Amino acid sequence: MPTSVAADPAEREARTVAWIAGIAHFFSHLFEPVFYVVALVLPKQFGIPYEQALTLIIVGKLLYGLCAPAAGWLGDRWSATGMMAVYFLGLGASALWVGLAGSPTEMALALVAMGIFGSIYHPVGIAWLVRSAKNRGKALGFNGVFGGLGPAAAGVTAGALIETFGWRSAFIAPAVLVLALGVVFVVLLRTGVIRETKRDAAPQAEPDRRDTVRAYAILALCMLCGGLIYQATQSSLPKVFEERLGDWIGGTGTLGIGTAVMIVYGVAGLLQVWCGHLADRYPLKAVYIGMYLVQVPLLAAAASLAGVPLLLTAVMMVTLSIGALPAENSLLAKFTPARWRATAYGAKFVIAFGISGLGVQLAGWIRGTTGDFFWLYVGLASAAAIIAACALRLPGDQPKPAPVAVPAE
C-alpha cells in the first residue's frame, strides 16, 4: 500500500507533464503550416511572387533546427522546465510580431525569432517527456497526436481567420493563446505543481558505446531523409491541394484548402496513439523500417494523383511519416545516456528541422523550375526507400534489462 500511495504523486505529475508537453508540441507545429496557408495570400498583400513568399520562412526554419543543440544543452545543464517557460513566452511574442509585420523583410525577421524560440521544444520537451514516462512509446504516441493536430488545426483555422478577419489574425490569435499558456506554466512552476527532475521514471542500462556510434551514424542519415520528406510535404500540400483538389473543396479558397490540410494532419495525428503502441509492443527497428517502406509507393503515387485519391493518399503518407517518430525517438533514447538526452535530441533536430528545412526551398525551386510538384514527390519516394534500406543496418533490439533500482526521492 505505501508503494501505491507514493506512486500517486509521481503518476499525477507524469500525466501533467504529458499534457503540457502535448500542448507545447501542438503549438510547435502550428505556426509553420499557418504560414504556408498565409503565403497563398501574401503575393497580393506584399506584391511579391508566391515562390518568394515561401522563402521568407527559410532562415527561421533553419534556425528552428540549428539552435536545437544549444537549447538541448541548456535543458540538460540548466533546467528543462525553465527552458519550457522560455519556449512558451518567446514563441508567443515572436508569433505576435509575425502577425504585426508590415513588410516581407520584417516578417522574415519575426520568423527568425519564432524559429529560435520554437527550437526549444523538440530537444527539451521530448527529453522532459521521455524522462517522466514509464511507457515511452505510448507517451511519445500521445505526444505525437498533438504534433499531428497542430498542422491539422492550422490549416482550417488559418483559412477561416484569413477569410473572416484577414491574414494577420491567423498569427495574432494563436500567439495570444501561447503567451497565456506561458504565464500559466510559470505559475505551475512557482507553486510546485511541476518540478525539475533529472531521473528517468523507467531507468535503463547504459547503452553499449559501439552500438551507440553505429546507431547515431545510421539514424543521422535516416533523420535527414525523413526530415526532407516531412518538411517538403508540409510546405507543398496547400499548393498541391489548391491545384488538384479545387473541384472537391468548393473552389480554391483558403478555407477549403485549410480544411483539406486539417483532414490529412488530423487523421494522421489521431493515429499516433496506435503508432506509439506499435513502438512499445514490437521491435523498434522493425516498426521504423515498416513505416518508411510503405511510404515509398504512396509518395510516388502522390506525384500524379488528384481529387479524392490524392487526399486519401496524403492521409496515409503523412500518418506514416509522423508515425515513424515514436519509434525513432525511442531508438534515440535507447542509445543515449539519460544525462545527455536533451543534447542528443537537439543534435537530431539540427538534421530534422535545420538541414532538412531546405526541403521548403527544394519544394519552391522544383515548382518554379518545372511548374508542378511531380518530381518533388518522386524524389521523396526515393528518400523513403533510402531510409528503409539504411535502417536495416541498425543494431537489433536486445532483451530488456532488469529495472535499475533507484532510491525514492
Image (cartoon, rainbow, N blue to C red):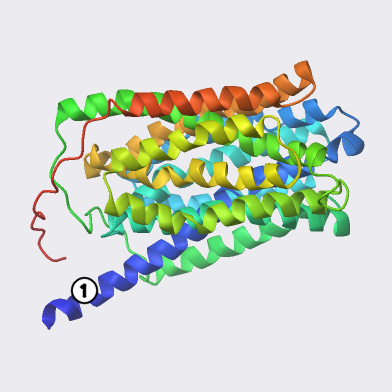
**Is residue 93 visible to the viewer in this orientation of the structure?**
yes
Label 1 element class: helix
**Most foreground residue, 186 or 166:** 166
Q: Residue at x 75, y 51 (%)?
A: 258
The x, y position of residue 84, in whole percent, is 45, 53
Q: Is residue 52 above or below residue 40?
A: above
Residue found at x 37% / y 66%: 194
Does the image show residue 88? no
Residue 374 percent across, percent down from the top left: 70, 25
Q: Amino acid at mark 1?
A: Ala
- Please tell me which residue is depicted at 48% across the width and 64% down the height of the picture: 185
In the picture, residue 218 is in which quadrant?
A: top left
Give the camera-side residue of 315 and 26: 315
Q: Residue at x 67, y 60 (%)?
A: 176
Residue 86 in percent (x, y) is at 50, 51
Q: Quadrant of the C terminus?
A: bottom left
Residue 190 pos. (x, y %): 41, 67
Q: Among all residues in the image, which is located at the extreme bottom?
A: 1
In the rendered image, which quarter contains the N terminus? bottom left
Numbered circles on residues, count: 1
Report which quarter residue 329 is drawn in.
Answer: top left
Decide if residue 15 is on the left or right side of residue 31: left
Residue behind mark 1:
7
Asked if residue 293 is positioned above or below residue 267 in the image, the reply reads above
In the rendered image, the residue lying farthest to the top is 369
